[in-house]
Image (spheres, helix red, strand yellow):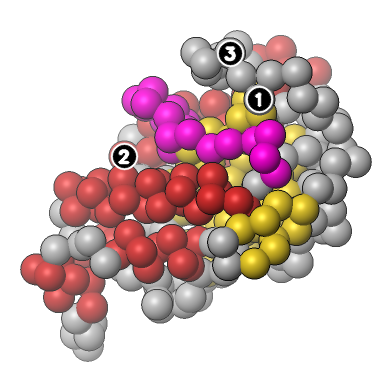
Amino acid sequence: MPIHDWTRVTAGTWHAFHLSWISEIQEALNDGLMPQDYYAQAEQIAGPLGPDVLTLQEPETPLNGTHSRTAEVSTGGVATATAPPPMRHTMEAEMNDYVLKRRTIVIRHSSGDRIVALLEIVSPGNKSARHAIESFVEKAVEALYRGYHLLIIDLFPPGPRNPDGIHARIWGELSDEPYHLSPDEPLTLAAYSAGQRKRGYVEPTAVGRTLIDMPLFLTPEMYVNVPLEATYQAAYRGVPRRWKEVLEATPST
């Protein structure tokens, strides 16, 4: 199924789809995609990077970069991976002292289990004003500093406050390495490994493309692939016909 142009529909329509997609991703992750001592849980905190899905690890379970257990799912065996994800753009950065000192926001979870990773599906509101996007970027950088791996899905085109997309804003806080979006691929899928050296794996995409699976890191080296296309399709089935007709209409020329 191609990525739809969600700028065509109301904010409420996107929000309803957003909630369904979060639910489908959580269910997929908890249905055997991750090792048994990890689990995903939708987050209830509102605001920028009050993440959509948290990946947590049960207490008293060692967390290290050599973990390579295979998880079993109902459709067959799915292995965690340690080879670098085959994304088109990869980058590395050290977080300097200036970055570390300027961030003060702490991301917490009340369950007491250890937070491992955060998944965020970007909404227009995250980029609607200067303070909104700055808050989103600040919390993303803070999460990486705290050692929380990130997966960010942005299916909305950039605007004047993020002309090269949300990844360029985040990576610009970590490194002087430039990143520029192509006008033909204005949407962004970005995974981040939050080890001592921060690594970004970026896949630009566009309306009309099929979503690819993206890595969700559980340790700095180990990740599972999140089935974005399958979960997107499952969530899309619940979109009202009235809005499907808008989303699937051929653009006028």
**Does the stretch in magenta take in 199?**
no
Does 205 sit above or below residue 26? below
Can you say which quadrant of the picture contains the C terminus? bottom left
- The residue lying at 37 percent from left, 26 percent from top is 44
Foreground residue among 233 and 33: 33
Q: Left or right: where does residue 245 sit relative to residue 229?
A: left
Image-quadrant location for residue 173: top right
Q: Which residue is mark 1?
A: 58
Report whether residue 133 is seen.
Answer: no
Q: Left or right: where does residue 186 sit relative to residue 106?
A: left
Q: Which residue is mark 2?
A: 125
- Assess disc 2: are there few (<14), some (14-19) or many (≥20) residues with their C-alpha within 10 Å of its C-alpha: few
Which residue is farthest right?
66
Helix, strand or loop at disc 1? loop
Q: Which residue is mark 3?
A: 112
Q: Which residues are magenta?
A: 35-52
Residue 103 location (% of width, % of height) = 63, 16
Between marks 1 and 2 in the image, the one whose residue lies nearer the viewer: 1
- Assess disc 1: are there few (<14), some (14-19) or many (≥20) residues with their C-alpha within 10 Å of its C-alpha: some
* Pointer 1 or 2: first along the chain: 1
